Image (cartoon, grey):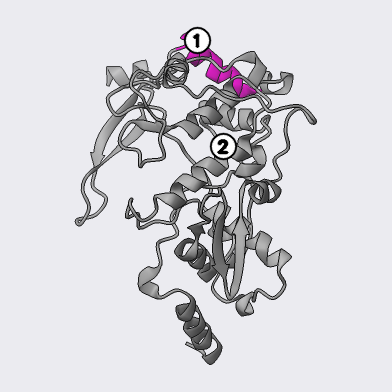
Amino acid sequence: MNPIAAQQVALDNALVAPENRVNIGICNMIIDPKKTLKEPTYQVVLDDLALTTCYPAFLSMAEVPEIYMHQFWHTITKIKNLSSYKFNLDKKKCTIDVEVFRDILQICPRLPNQEFVVPPSSNEEIVSFIKELGYTVINICLSRKTTGHNKIRLSRAQILWELYYNQNADFVKLLWEDFMFQIDNRDSKKQENMYYPRFTKAIIHHFISKNKPISIRNKLFMHTVQDDSILGSLRFVPKTKEYQVYGALIPARMTNRKMLNLIAYKTYLVFATRVVTPKKARKFKKLTSPSKKKALVTVEEPVEKPVKKSAARR
């Protein structure tokens, strides 16, 4: 290691000791709007998200020193009796709340100068809505406690409700509620991976640009745009099923004329309405490595080619 890098490592260790850091995982991934996907349902989902006001949240990116990402999660604490939090960047103390978060994400309301539509908050209403989408087993966590298996937090269910009904929603507030949940429960959950790494970078970049005294630390050990995980695939065939499962159709209010004319949407529509049966998927066991367990991999059933008569005679 060269002297400059060695000095930087020492400075980083003084901010957050290696044993107090967490892994920068692959959650909160970025969407590449230029990438066209072969899976029609997935492509339709991305095309639909592009029509929403919260779409900028899927595109935000930044480059920041990686140590500041660790320092953010290591030092962030709730300010008593407020929905604000304080944290350190280098030797600078910073404060963030929902309004700062709104300024960072730059998500504007669908209808300016109008009140936001308040999504339903009762368990019965949300559960009924989720079942409308085709889900049969779902539990809503209305408290700020850690959720378990087959549970969805209220803020996430409300985001889905706002998207589905195309309402003038305060998406930033709902995203902030989920972000606060992760902060408040990061110790009790004993998670080894960092929550919302891309939002963490956006927050840090915001404060660095606003506070020039915060050092960029010679731009060594940066977490760059290339380090962000890109959302590349989703699973549409459940492990216990042979075909893709479709719930409620995407309503017309969530589409536009351009989207309706795309091949991906037309393909999705004939599958979702059962006009055409999707290709059957088969599962087989594949050994990844001697040290790992066998994993289930879903592949498309190959189409059998007709045997030529000449070949059959032979």
Image position, residue 180 (x, y; %): 50, 47
Using the image as rendered, state which of residue 29 and residue 242 is in the foreground: 29
Confirm whether the magenta stretch covers residue 265: yes
Front tag of 2 and 1: 2
Q: Nearer the viewer, residue 311 or 268?
A: 268
Q: Position of residue 313 (x, y in %)?
A: 28, 17
Query: Relative to 171, is 66 above or below?
Result: below
Q: Nearer the viewer, residue 142 or 207?
A: 142
What kind of element bears circle 1? loop
Q: In the figure, residue 146 lies in which quadrant?
A: top left
Residue that label 2 marks: 174
Q: Residue 239: image x %, image y %?
A: 29, 29
Residue drawn at x 19%, y 56% as measured from the top left: 290
* Farthest residue, direction bottom: 3
Within-10-Å neighbours for mark 1: few <14, some 14–19, many 20+: few
Q: Secondary structure at mark 2?
A: helix
The magenta span reads 262-276
309 horizontally vs 161: left or right: left
Mark before the other along the chain sequence, 2 or 1? 2
| Residue 247 at least partly seen | no
Q: Position of residue 288 (x, y in %)?
A: 27, 50
Residue type at tag 1: Thr
Q: CA distance from mark 2 to mark 1?
A: 32 Å
User: Is 39 inside the magenta-drawn segment?
Assistant: no
| Numbered badge on residue 273 | 1
Tell me the amino acid under the disc marked 2. Answer: Leu
Is residue 66 shown to the viewer in this render?
yes
